[in-house]
Image (cartoon, rainbow, N blue to C red):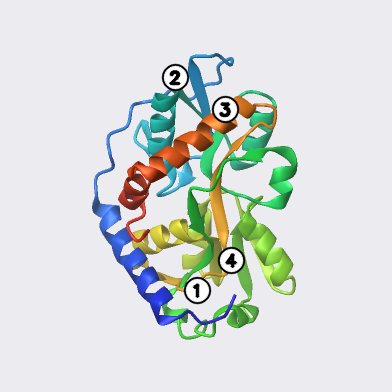
Amino acid sequence: MPNNLSSSRWSVLICFFAGLLLLVGCAAQKQHVVETTEIPSGKNVLRAGVTTNAQPLVYRQGNEIVGLEADFARELAKDLGKSLHIVEYDWEDLIPALMANKIDIIMSGMSITRLRKVRIAFTVPYFKSGLMALIRREDAARFSAGLFSLTTSSAIGAIKDTTSEYFVETNYSSVKKILFSNTKPAVKALIDKRIDMFIYDAPLILYLASENETKGLTALFTLFTEEYLAWGVRKDNKELLESANNFLRTANSDGRLQQMIKYWIPFAK
């Protein structure tokens, strides 16, 4: 991907950022309080696995789980005529839980990758995303050259077991890498100048930039990769995979999909 964005891409990203500024102050749509303990599989329940550290995709707000994926899960369960049961796991435990039949579907902003496709099946994508960097505003000029300028970093932060870790390992092996289990310690490390940038999925990076604007953070408005988000299903559960795909296609054609996406990610077309 080129280091510099076209003017149209800049416009999209600026709209993205502006929309997220509004999003931080908006009240989330009302969600049903959901149980988060494991239950056996059943014909009348949809067990959706999530990791609740990915604003605005899925996160905790008090005792409720909210975000784009939470809205999706509720609508999918309704479409299937099933009750919804959301189960929380650490990110690295989501695929093992799915394969062990502890959950039916992963709905947690997961990117489609070739290695993940070895173990699980993915639905059709619902969103095109990519990796982006969170930086200190004082360093904006330093990183204005885009991808090339990352080589001047003394340390880059990424989330363990995600595409951000793989990206840093593959492209910047000579730069010190610090891995985090979630975004909170990564943001603190950036503010404390223990890392020079934090690389993660674009919707989350811009949310964090908005949330930490008064603490001197901003986003580096360059998309490093092109990724597609989808839901993960066991390969032997072809019925659910087909049903989820049918739901996505129908929701896309009747406008529901875009309406839900735009509520949580205002820049999306």
The secondary element bearing badge 4 is classed as loop
Q: Which residue is mark 3?
A: 240
Q: Residue at x 55, y 72 (%)?
A: 196
Where does the C terminus fall, quadrant-wise?
bottom left
Q: Earlier in the sequence, mark 2 or mark 1?
A: 2
Q: Amino acid at mark 4?
A: Thr
- Dots 4 and 2: beta carbons under 8 Å? no
Alpha-carbon distance for marks 1 and 4?
9 Å
The answer to whether residue 22 is visible is yes
x and y, in percent, of residue 166 in the image = 69, 59
Q: CA distance from mark 2 to mark 3?
A: 12 Å
Front position in the image: 147 or 151: 147
Residue 165's place in the image compared with 50, above or below, is: below
Question: Nearer the N terminus, badge 2 or badge 3?
Answer: 2
Label 4 crowd (10 A; few <14 / some 14-19 / many >=20)? some
For disc 2, the marked residue is 82
Front residue of this view, candidates 188 and 112: 112
Q: Which residue is the site of mark 1?
A: 222
Q: Earlier in the sequence, mark 3 or mark 1?
A: 1
**4 and 3 marks in contact (CB < 8 Å):** no
Q: Amino acid at mark 3?
A: Leu
Binning the other alpha carbons within 10 Å of mark 3 as few (below 14), some (14 to 19) or many (20 upward) gives: some
Q: Which residue is mark 4?
A: 225
Q: Is residue 104 visible?
A: no
In the picture shown, does residue 228 fall above or below 218?
above
> Could you tell me residue 39's position as x and y percent?
55, 16
Query: Closer to us: mark 4 or mark 3?
Result: 3
Secondary structure of the residue carrying numbered label 3: helix
- The correct choice, above or below, for 223 with respect to 244 in the image is below
Please identify the quadrant where the N terminus is shown: bottom right
Cα distance between the residues tagged 4 and 3? 30 Å
